[in-house]
């Protein structure tokens, strides 16, 4: 009889903690890991866009600590950060910057832009969206690249086979359309390969990690040094994080 007491205790306690209420919410995808909800996504079009069937970019929530359900069961508040599910595309860049510097496929990742241009892009996107964007820190980027709390410990971001998740030296000679390989456990695409991504190191220096279309396997997994990102480089692109606090309202 005694061995049934823990289960009986939990069955009594969980409703009081509100855990049973997660099923009352309709999310784009509900994945589980570390006791925290994954797969919360928001798609955004820019204010100047009209008749756009697909959002200009999508943010996916990466929880890092806690998830709280309010007493009335209608609001969810999360700690963590939002990250773009793909590298910044040429379409988003051209729309924000107001130029046609990239004449090729709009769905290719932006590359070969200087730190000053990236900084200007972030400022203009902030102004257009009324949100606070920035480059990810090393800690944020590595945590997200590894799949967050859902990490399966893969060698690459989402698989032990680079060809499943990355464009790299073995299968590419140039950048490819974003989100054509499999995502990682946190629903992020191209965290390995395609173009290397700019991150802010603990000393404030910016480096580009994750490897790129011309990388070998060692470069794909290098999270210690990466590539210097102090000037424009065709191998380097970026994605942004947004730390503006968000509360997801129940559709009930």
Image (cartoon, grey):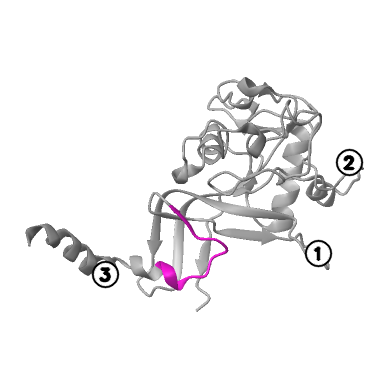
Q: Is residue 226 visible?
A: no
In x, y percent, where is residue 98? 87, 49
Comparing 2 with 93, the one in front is 2
Q: Nearer the viewer, residue 27 or 230?
A: 27
Residue range corresponding to the magenta coloring:
22-32
Residue 155 shows in the view: yes
Q: Earlier in the sequence, mark 2 or mark 1?
A: 1
* Residue 52 tag number: 1
**Crowdedness near tag 3: few (<14), some (14–19) or many (≥20) residues, C-alpha within 10 Å:** few
Compared to 50, does 242 lie above or below?
Answer: above
Q: In this view of the protein, which residue sits in the foreground, 41 or 175?
A: 175
**Marks 2 and 3 close (CB-CB < 8 Å):** no
Number of labels in the image equals 3
Q: Secondary structure at mark 2?
A: loop
Residue 88 point in image, percent of width and height? 73, 44
> Is residue 30 part of the magenta span, yes or no?
yes
Mark 2 or mark 3, earlier in chain:
3
Location of the N terminus (image quadrant)? bottom left
* In-image side of 30 versus 193 (left or right): left
Q: Quadrant of residue 226?
A: top right
Quarter of the view holding residue 122: top right
Residue 132 lies, with reference to residue 156, above or below; the image says: below
Relative height, residue 160 to residue 184 (above, below): above
Q: Where is mark 3, residue-wise? A: 16
What is the C-alpha distance between the residues marked 3 and 1? Answer: 44 Å
Q: CA separation, marks 2 and 1?
A: 20 Å
Q: Is residue 36 magenta?
A: no
User: Compared with residue 88, is residue 204 higher up or lower down, i.e. above or below?
Assistant: above
Look at mark 2 in the image and give the residue it sits on: 102
Residues packed near mark 1 inside 10 Å, few (<14), some (14 to 19) or many (20 plus): few
Q: Which residue: 74% across, 38% down?
A: 118
Distance of mark 2 from mark 3, alpha carbons?
A: 55 Å
């Amino acid at each position: 009889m005694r061995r049934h007491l823990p289960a009986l205790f939990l069955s009594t306690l969980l409703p009081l903690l509100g855990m049973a209420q997660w099923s009352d919410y309709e999310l784009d995808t509900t994945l589980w890991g570390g006791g925290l909800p994954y797969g919360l996504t928001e798609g955004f079009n820019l204010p100047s866009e009209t008749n756009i069937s697909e959002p200009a970019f999508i943010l996916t929530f990466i929880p890092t600590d806690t998830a709280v359900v309010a007493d009335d069961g209608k609001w969810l508040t999360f700690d963590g950060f939002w990250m773009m599910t793909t590298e910044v595309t040429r379409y988003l860049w051209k729309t924000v910057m107001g130029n046609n510097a990239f004449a090729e496929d709009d769905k290719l990742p932006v590359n070969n832009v200087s730190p000053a241009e990236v900084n200007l892009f972030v400022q203009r996107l902030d102004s257009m969206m009324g949100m606070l964007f920035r480059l990810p820190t090393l800690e944020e980027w590595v945590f997200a690249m590894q799949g967050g709390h859902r990490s399966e410990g893969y060698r690459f971001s989402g698989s032990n086979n680079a060809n499943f998740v990355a464009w790299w030296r073995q299968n590419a000679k140039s950048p490819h359309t974003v989100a054509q390989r499999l995502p990682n456990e946190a629903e992020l695409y191209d965290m390995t390969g395609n173009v290397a991504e700019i991150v802010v190191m603990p000393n404030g220096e910016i480096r580009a990690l994750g490897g790129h279309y011309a990388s070998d396997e060692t470069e794909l997994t290098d999270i210690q040094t990466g590539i210097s990102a102090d000037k424009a480089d065709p191998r380097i692109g970026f994605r942004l994080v947004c730390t503006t606090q968000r509360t997801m309202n129940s559709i009930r």
